[in-house]
Image: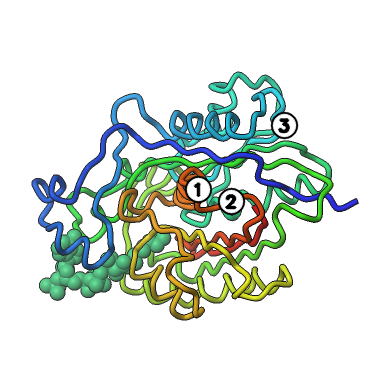
Amino acid sequence: MTLRAVIAGTGSALPKRRVTNEELAETVDTSDEWIVERTGIRARHIAGEGETTATLGAEAARRALDAAGIEPTAIDLIVLATATPDQTFPASATKIQDMLGIRDCVAFDVAAVCSGFLYAISVAESMIRAGSARTALVIGAETFSRILDWEDRTTCVLFGDGAGAVVLRGEDTEDRGILSVALHADGRHNQLLYVDGGPSTTGTVGKLRMKGQEVFRHAVVNLAAVLGEAVAKAGLEMKAIDWVVPHQANRRILDATARKLGLSPEKVIVTVDEHANTSAASVPLALDTAVRDGRIKRGDLVVLEAMGGGFTWGAAALRF
Ligand code: COA
């Protein structure tokens, strides 16, 4: 028997309010031209009153369950990737569990910032293969707008809020499912992308700080390497890959990584123009977008990849 974690359904959710670059330029010293040229971002969604990481995550999870045709009660594991939980504790995964009406399952958060969804997929996939879970909700949900310094134009224009989710189900199959995962972290780079607060240091939530150019340089090198690693680990060649679903941080990072790997740009799913960088939500949001618009189909070979604060980075190869 080959037990594989198969994606049975995807879903996503965005806050109601969509904010264009022009609208942002009314309050921040920036311009649509600068943001589009340097990042490819045209708009982002920003959470309003009543919209939180948990509410967005629950909405994305409901849509993934609907797509999979699975009742919430069948879920025995919820892993939420987030760096912006509703509260320091309890884990927002347990809030989502309650919102979905699930009375007993394993539920916890994973914090690996923008790579969080890859880390969460890896944990859920391992638990499924080990037999300690059967049907999992893996969610990436964030409200970065609440940890941005809106006076810092070098960071506040880059991020947005949102959520994405997948239902992962254990199946005895060789044809579909997650084929490989590669994860990395290098804590020497903590100070290049971080939040200047926390419960155990300042006792405050803090704001996001970033040395953009240095992050950019590391991103292209690390992402190209880990993508190649996941593909090789799955016993595949890069030319066999149908779709790459990258972390949506910056259009220039996506283009440079694809160039480095000799990947055709048509194979790369891009949503950064509409969503900006939604951290742990960005990969499942982009995946759900491409599944719903019919690009990613059952049987396609797909690679997910991301990099974030820490640094942490990772990739997963799967047959959808
Ligand atoms: N609007 C207008 N001008 C801006 C601006 C903004 N929002 N932000 C910065 N600038 C200015 C700078 O002040 C600087 O002006 P100066 O030359 O007069 O000093 C100029 O634009 C160039 O800034 P620079 O930082 O060199 O731009 P860049 O080409 O490196 O682009 C980023 C900046 C942040 C877009 C880019 O470094 C990046 O995308 N880095 C990766 C970030 C990332 O993806 N992080 C998340 C990873 S999970």
**How many residues crowd mark 1 within 10 Å: few (<14), some (14–19), many (20+)?**
few
C-alpha distance separating marks 2 and 3: 26 Å
- The location of residue 315, given as percent across then percent down, is 59, 63
Q: Earlier in the sequence, mark 2 or mark 3?
A: 3
- In this view, the residue farthest toward the right is 1
Q: Nearer the viewer, residue 80 or 247?
A: 247
- Amino acid on which the number 1 mark rests in the picture: Gly
Looking at the rendering, the quadrant in which ligand 1 lies is bottom left
- Mark 3 is on which residue type? Asp
Residue that appears at 54% across and 45% down: 81
Mark 1 and mark 2: Cα distance apart in space: 7 Å
Q: Is residue 226 left or right of residue 23?
A: right
The secondary structure type at the circle numbered 1 is loop
- 252 to 282, vertically: above or below: below
Element type where label 2 sits in the image: loop
Q: What label sits on residue 294 in the rendered view?
A: 1
Observer-nearest of 247 and 183: 247
